[in-house]
Amino acid sequence: MNKLNRITSILLPIALLSSPSVLAVDYSYSGFMTVGLGRVLSGSVSGQNEVGIDCPCMITDYSQAAFYEDSWSLKPDSKVGLQGSVMFNEQLSLTGQVVSRGSRDFKLNLEWVYLSYQVNDNNTVQVGRKRLPLFYYSEQQDVGFTYPWVHLPGQTYGWEAVNYNGLNWSHNVQFGDWSGIVNVFGGSETRKDSDYLKLYSGLDSESDTKWSGIFGAEMVLSKDWFEGRLMVMQSDTQGRVVSDGEDWSEKAMQQIYGASALVDYNDYLLTAELFYSDRTESYGRDLAYTLSAGKRFDGYLVLFTHGLYQQKIYQDNPEEVTETDREKHRNTSIVVKFDVSASSDFKVQFEHWQDYSGSWFKENYGDANTLSMAYNLVF
Amino acid sequence: MNRVWLVPMFFLSINALAEVAVVVHPSNTAALNAEEISKIYLGRSKSFPDGKAAIPLAQADGTGATATFNEKVLNKTGSQIKAYWSKLVFTGKGTPPKELGTDQEVIELVSQNPSVIGYVDKSAVTASVKVVATF
């Protein structure tokens, strides 16, 4: 909560000074909840791995170090979030969102707090702490009710930075029958005691990661039953293993590209997400995709998904990463989503993780078959 | 025999109640089709085709008018609409239309403001508003 206090202490006075009529404030609040349960049914690794996870095991959310082990657990997917907004006038508002998640022992964590200024009907400027819009579902990743899976496909949604502190400008666009949004963002993110890195360095380890000079843009266009999205961003990355007494590594630039397409036509649902990153200054490059196809029936949806993540390790790379550390895996899943009410659902998901990584990842995570289910609610 | 006829009459009455009228202020001259209305209600357009500002009003979940409007105009179920707006609300990208509780409240607000657009059960329409489409 210290981070929340620090950011709100900056944003709140700005909002109050900018508001001509402080007494005319209006408030709203909303929230979301996921109660998730699951376990790994079988897998290629058994016993406790080097990281400290009881295997067979499967990672479900890299950024929060969420994983299922070989016994039933509520922790990996369960979370509850609350969002409150204060509208100072029709143009200016302050929004904060805190999330308590099982993977972090239900400690409160600040995910969003930002000041929003609506310049006019088509332009909005926001400053503060927000989600990094890397992929189509990135910004809504905590709100399980808004996507079809129990958890987002880890092959695409698996990065060390998911938030940033900075500024963004969004602009609504219209091209004939097409409507959409262009969003330009910039800022930085320092993740102290990164959960993501615990999945590699050990659950008891402490590592920091930093993305500085983040600058990127996304464009989303939709028409009737089609929605498409393009994203590009770059930043410098640094890391350090605090528990080994390391200093920050040299800055290494990364460039990330994403493309998504969604078709929702006559109860048939198709989605495709492609991802490519250039991390030549670190170790090489990454490629990932997620493809899904499903059909909506009366009150429920059946969806098949297949995803791939693979690293290409360059020879003589600056971080001296070897083929042993290379990561490559596929995940195939089927999920059935039942509409419980207009604002709640229940999902059951079975997934098969096939590992083709170098020896380290294969020996510590490997293949897995996992069953999970979740009740999702928004309020 | 009476019971035999009661069943179809019941469904006929439901269908009649479920027909909705999209209404605007009488001074509003905008011509609107289902696609344009859908854009306004999904937050993809902030104005009428003539360029004037548009403020959509919805009705609470569970009303017959909302169910029909969602299905016939927005081509989505109530659950899909809720998921759509939840995404925008929790990512700071939009705010759903204000929800009112009754047809009468919608008609009252529409009749007072040329920028407002609403939908009501067709049988609730009064002379104080203008019907631009029925579904």
Image (tube, rainbow, N blue to C red):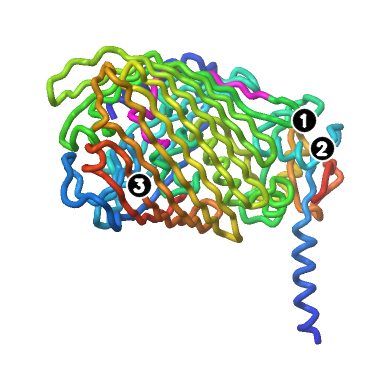
Contact (CB < 8 A) between labels 3 and 1? no
Range of magenta residues? A156-173
Q: Report the mark closest to the observer, 2 or 3.
A: 3
Seen from the viewer's position, the closer of residues B63 and A229 is A229
Q: Residue at x 52, y 46 (%)?
A: A292
Residue A210 vs residue A354, the one in the foreground: A354
Judging from the image, mark 1 belongs to the subunit labelled B
Q: Type of residue at label 1?
A: Phe
Residue matched to label 2: B32
Tell me the distance, in whole angstroms, between the alpha carbons under discs 3 and 1. 52 Å
Task: Please tell me which residue is depicted at 43% across the width and 51% down the height of the picture.
Answer: A333
* Kind of residue at badge 3: Gln
Camera-side mark, 3 or 1? 3
The chain letter for the residue carrying disc 2 is: B
Please tell me how many numbered marks the rendered image carries. Answer: 3
- In the image, residue B9 above or below residue A236: below
Q: Position of residue A255 (x, y in %)?
A: 43, 19
Q: In what element is the residue under mark 1?
A: loop
Number of residues whose C-alpha sits closer than 10 Å to that of mark 1, classed few (under 14), some (14–19) or many (20 or more): many
Q: Which residue is mark 1?
A: B48
Q: Residue A134's image quarter?
A: top left
Measured as percent of width and height from the top left, residue A264 is found at: 63, 45
A54 drawn magenta: no
What residue did someone put label 3 on?
Answer: A354
Cβ atoms under marks 2 and 1 closer than 8 Å: yes
The structure residue drawn at horizontal position 75% and vertical position 39%, both measured from the top left corner, is B37
Q: Amino acid at mark 2?
A: Leu
Q: Earlier in the sequence, mark 2 or mark 1?
A: 2
Q: Is residue A9 visible?
A: no
Residues under labels 2 and 3: Cα distance? Answer: 52 Å
Of all chains, the one bearing label 3 is A
